Image (cartoon, rainbow, N blue to C red):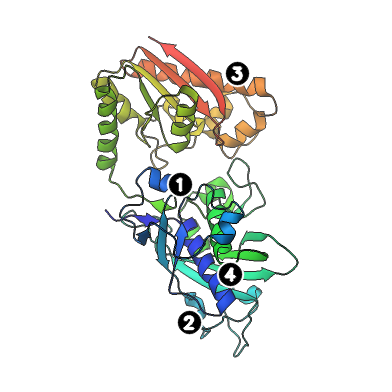
C-alpha cells in the first residue's frame, strides 16, 4: 500500500521551497527535506509517495552547525513544491517569479490588488498533503508557508496563520495560547529553513486555506484546538495498513518473542511506551499493539505467555480499565474524565496529560495516584485473560515514569 506524509512534512517542504524563493526569487519545483530518526528505524520510509533519497540534495551547513539536525536522521524525502493555488487563481505570480503583497492580505477570500510590485522580503510556497492509501481529514489539503526575513533577529520564528488551530486548553504537546504546530514538525521546519538560510532572523508562517472547514472533521474541537487543523507528525510519514494487516503484524512479533523463548511478553501501545519500557527494563524487544491490546493479549495467551508487562501513557491504557480493548478513538471515548473521577480530582480537564501536569508539583501524590491506576488496570487484565501476572508501567508524554502496578492471579 502507498505511504504518505504528514502535515508536518508538508509544512517543512513548503518552508524550504519558500526559503529558497526568498533568496533567489524563484520557487523550486521540488525540495528534499530530512525525516525524523524514527521513520527509518521502523522501516517507514519504504514506499513513500515522494521520492526517497539517502542523501540531501542541498547542504546542511547551517542546520547541522546549529545542531538542528539532531534527531532528523531518518532519511530524506523529495516533494514537489508549488505556488499557492489561491495566488494563481487571483492572477498573482507563479513559480519562477517573486510573490508580492502584504502578508495580512493573504487570507480568504484572497482578494488581490489589481497590481503590485515584487516584495523580496517575503515568499510563499505550498505542498499538497498526501496521506497515501490511508486518507484522513487532511488528505489533499494545500499546506502553504510564508517565509520572510526578520532583520532585527537571529532566530527562526514559527507561527500559525489562517487555518492553523489555536490551542486553548492544557494537556497537549503545545501549550495554550500557541498555534497547534507540534514539536517535531517545528524542528523539521526550522531545520529545512536553515538548510537554505544558514543564519539570520526568519519568520515562518504556516497557512492552511481549508483548515477551518477540515478541522471540523477532526478531534480538534473536542481537544480545545480552535480555528483550524494541527500540524502534526512524529515520523514525518503516514503508514496505511488495514486492521487485519496491523493485527497480523502484531501477532507475528508476538510469535517471534515466543520463538526466542521469552517467558514474559513486553508490550506497549506505541513508540513512547516502547522506548520508555526498553529504557526501564533493558529488554531488547517490546511489541507495539497499536489500538489492539485485546487482540494482542488474546494471541499472547494462545502463544503460551502467562506473564505480561505493558508500558504506555495512561490516556491509552486506562481505556482497558474502562472495558475498551480496542482503543481507537472512533471505538472508545477519551479517558480523561474516567481518570479524574478515579483519582478523585475536581475540575475540568482536557486530556489525561493535563491531569499529570496538575499533579506533577507533588511527586509523591503523582506517583501514588497513577500507581493505584496502574494496579487497577493490571487487575482488570488478569481478570479478563488467562494470565498469571500483569505489570503496568505508566509514562507521561515526556517518557517519565509516573506510576506502576502489578496484579497476580
- Which one is nearer the viewer's eye here, 79 or 227? 79
How far apart, in angstroms, are the residues tagged by discs 2 and 1? 38 Å
Instruction: Report x, y in % for residue 271.
Output: 44, 37
Residue with the mark numbered 1: 37
Q: Count numbered badges in the picture.
A: 4
Q: Is residue 214 above or below residue 402?
A: below
Q: Quadrant of the C terminus?
A: top left
Q: Nearer the viewer, mark 1 or mark 3?
A: 1
**Contact, mark 2 vs mark 1 (Cβ under 8 Å):** no
Query: How many other residues sit within 10 Å of disc 3, few (<14), some (14-19) or many (≥20)?
Result: some
Instruction: Report x, y in % for residue 178.
Output: 65, 53
Instruction: Report x, y in % for residue 313.
Output: 50, 32
**Contact, mark 1 vs mark 3 (Cβ under 8 Å):** no
Q: Is residue 346 above or below residue 116?
A: above
Q: Is residue 36 left or right of residue 203?
A: left
Residue with the mark numbered 4: 146
Residue with the mark numbered 2: 89
Q: Is residue 142 above or below residue 371?
A: below
Tell me the SS state at disc 3: helix
Query: How many other residues sit within 10 Å of disc 1, few (<14), some (14-19) or many (≥20)?
Result: some
**Tag 3 or tag 2, which sits nearer the N-term?**
2
Tell me the SS state at disc 2: helix
Residue with the mark numbered 3: 368
Q: Which residue is pictured at 41% across the width and 48% down the height? A: 39
**Tag 1 or tag 2, which sits nearer the N-term?**
1
Tell me the SS state at disc 1: helix
How far apart, in angstroms, are the residues tagged by discs 4 and 2? 18 Å
**Tag 3 or tag 1, which sits nearer the N-term?**
1
Amino acid at each position: 500500500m502507498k505511504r504518505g506524509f504528514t502535515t508536518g512534512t508538508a509544512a517543512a517542504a513548503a518552508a524550504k521551497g519558500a526559503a529558497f524563493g526568498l533568496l533567489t526569487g524563484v520557487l523550486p519545483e521540488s525540495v528534499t527535506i530530512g525525516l525524523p530518526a524514527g521513520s527509518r528505524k521502523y522501516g517507514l520510509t519504504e514506499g513513500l509517495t515522494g521520492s526517497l533519497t539517502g542523501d540531501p540534495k542541498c547542504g546542511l551547513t547551517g542546520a547541522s552547525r546549529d545542531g538542528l539536525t539532531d534527531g532528523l536522521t531518518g532519511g530524506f524525502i523529495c516533494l514537489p513544491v508549488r505556488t499557492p493555488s489561491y495566488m494563481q487563481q487571483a492572477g498573482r505570480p507563479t513559480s519562477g517569479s517573486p510573490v508580492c503583497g502584504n502578508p495580512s492580505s493573504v487570507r480568504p477570500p484572497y482578494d488581490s490588488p489589481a497590481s503590485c510590485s515584487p516584495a523580496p522580503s517575503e515568499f510563499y510556497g505550498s505542498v499538497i498533503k498526501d496521506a497515501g492509501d490511508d486518507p484522513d481529514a487532511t488528505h489533499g489539503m494545500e499546506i502553504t508557508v510564508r517565509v520572510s526575513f526578520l532583520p532585527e533577529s537571529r532566530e527562526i520564528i514559527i507561527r500559525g496563520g489562517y487555518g492553523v488551530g489555536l490551542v486553548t486548553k492544557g494537556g497537549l504537546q503545545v501549550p495554550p495560547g500557541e498555534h497547534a504546530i507540534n514539536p517535531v514538525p517545528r524542528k523539521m521546519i526550522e531545520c529545512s529553513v536553515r538548510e537554505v538560510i544558514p543564519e539570520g532572523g526568519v519568520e515562518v508562517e504556516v497557512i492552511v486555506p481549508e483548515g477551518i472547514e477540515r478541522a471540523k472533521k477532526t478531534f480538534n474541537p473536542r481537544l480545545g484546538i480552535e480555528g483550524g487543523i494541527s500540524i502534526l507528525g512524529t515520523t514525518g510519514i503516514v503508514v496505511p495498513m488495514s486492521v487485519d494487516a496491523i493485527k497480523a503484524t502484531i501477532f507475528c512479533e508476538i510469535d517471534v518473542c515466543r520463538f526466542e523463548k521469552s517467558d514474559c511478553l513486553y508490550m506497549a501501545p506505541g513508540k513512547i511506551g516502547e522506548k520508555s519500557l526498553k529504557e526501564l527494563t533493558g529488554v531488547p524487544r517490546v511489541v507495539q499493539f497499536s489500538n489492539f491490546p485485546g487482540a494482542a493479549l488474546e494471541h499472547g495467551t494462545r502463544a503460551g505467555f502467562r506473564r505480561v508487562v505493558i508500558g504506555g501513557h495512561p490516556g491509552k491504557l486506562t481505556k482497558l480499565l474502562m472495558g475498551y480493548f480496542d482503543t481507537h478513538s472512533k471505538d472508545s471515548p477519551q479517558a480523561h474524565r474516567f481518570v479524574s473521577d478515579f483519582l478523585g480530582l475536581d475540575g475540568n480537564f482536557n486530556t489525561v496529560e493535563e491531569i499529570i501536569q496538575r499533579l506533577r508539583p507533588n511527586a509523591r501524590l503523582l506517583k501514588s495516584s497513577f500507581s493505584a491506576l496502574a494496579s487497577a488496570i493490571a487487575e482488570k487484565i488478569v481478570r479478563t485473560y488467562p494470565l498469571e501476572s500483569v505489570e503496568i508501567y505508566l509514562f507521561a508524554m515526556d517518557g517519565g515514569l509516573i506510576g506502576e502496578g502489578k496484579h497476580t492471579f
